[in-house]
Image (cartoon, coloured by chain):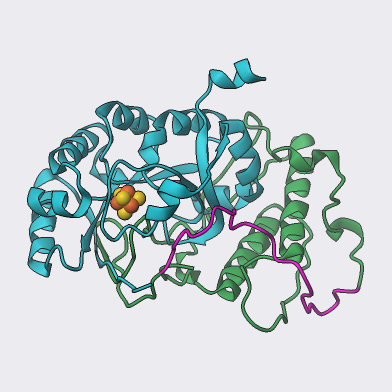
Chain colours: A cyan, B green
Amino acid sequence: MVSEKSSEALFPLLSIARLRMGTDGTGVTTLVAGAGCPLRCRWCINKKLLSDAPAENVSAAELLDRVKIDDLYFRTTGGGITFGGGESLLHADFIAQFRKICPSEWNIYAETSLAVPRKAVETASGCVSFFIVDCKDMNSGIYSAYTGGDAERMKANLRYLIETVGPQRILVRVPRIPEYNTEADQKRSVSELKALGIENTDVFDYIIREE
Amino acid sequence: MLGKEKCRILKEIRRKIADENDIPFVTEECTHKGNCRGTCPRCESELRYLEKQLARRTAVGKTVTLAALCTGMALAASGCAPVGISHIVGGGTELSGAVPYTDVIETPEPDIEVETGEVDWPGNEVELTGEVAPFEEDDPSADAFPFNEEETEIYLENDLSGMVAYEYGE
Ligand code: SF4
């Protein structure tokens, strides 16, 4: 059993949420959240979970077994599985394996910051139906202050995605981040995204609740 | 989206699947008071029943039609950050409106348990028979996908997008 599993990618499963509609994909979707993220966003809602929570490692077949219960809903609504987290593309190899064994009619969505190595984006471009990208802010200074990461990596990956899968398969979310950016910054981000060829943007506000 | 609204939409999808495939289907309005998760053992058994009926049709060479019931459902997103007001612009539908802080994944426990306990259905106590008998849990075909990928023809039609209430969060 051990040798069988060692040849396949495992997914650090944090949670599964069934029967979602219009929240993270088209049609009826199941959100599969995995552990791990390269960014350290100030307002991350999963911070504690990403670092402390024990995640259960599952194989693609094991995950399929858990989510196939909604096969009919997925097929009839254009829905499917949304990989989130954390950073879903850290598990691009796993998603590719899952894509191979799940029904071809299912859509695979990935919520991502694109703060990942190019290799992961390449792998994902071949198996993800639609990308939901949270760009944070396109301004490098704001981006690094808020996430601790490098905006240039995200932008380079976004350009690569636009070239390989096309803008129709990408939604970029542009948040208003309290204490970090303004509406004017959001507008500048949207303009920059449009200049890159992005057609679908989601402009929204992070709402911070005190504990 | 409230569980009751979700339940209504899912029930409509099940009814549509049955209609499209000439599957006898009896469902009753839920009279459960208060909110729910959008599904319950009764709803799940209806879904399993449909799977079983579709598998039977496939096995005898009948065409199975799975219409695209909700192709217009919005592509919005929740993600890993605190969600607030959204305005999706572009190929998707433009959405707006204040929503509560939603979609926090707070627990390593899967959020998928079927709600248990008493659901007040009219006729709940009456055992269904014949073609509309609920799915049997010990049926060995229960875990099998109901469709043979090679044999199943799937038609996408009937955009009923208007029936979906757009909303963020759960
Ligand atoms: S990208 Fe998301 S999961 Fe990662 S640190 Fe930022 S908010 Fe948290």
Residue A25 seen by the camera: no
Q: Is residue A102 left or right of residue A195?
A: right
Q: Quadrant of residue A167?
A: top left
Residue A173 seen by the camera: yes
Q: Is residue A73 left or right of residue A112?
A: right
Task: Tell me the residue at 55%/52% (across/down).
Answer: B108
Q: Give percent across and percent down for residue B169.
A: 44, 67
Task: Tell me the residue at 40%/32% (across/down).
Answer: A92
Q: Is residue B114 magenta?
A: yes
Count of numbered tags: 0
Figure check: B78 above or below A128: below
Q: Nearer the viewer, residue B53 or A94?
A: A94
Figure check: A1 above or below A57: above
Q: Nearer the viewer, residue B35 or A164?
A: B35
Q: Nearer the viewer, residue A150 or B78?
A: A150
Q: Which residues are magenta?
A: B102-125
Q: Quadrant of residue B12?
A: bottom right
Q: Main secondary structure of the magenta part?
A: loop
> On the rendered image, what quadrant is the N terminus of chain A found in?
top right
Q: Give percent across and percent down for residue A203.
A: 22, 63
> On the rendered image, what quadrant is the C terminus of chain A found in?
bottom left
Q: Is residue A200 magenta?
A: no
Q: Give percent across and percent down for residue A40.
A: 27, 49
Q: Residue furthest front?
A: A52
Task: Tell me the residue at 42%/34% (across/down).
Answer: A91
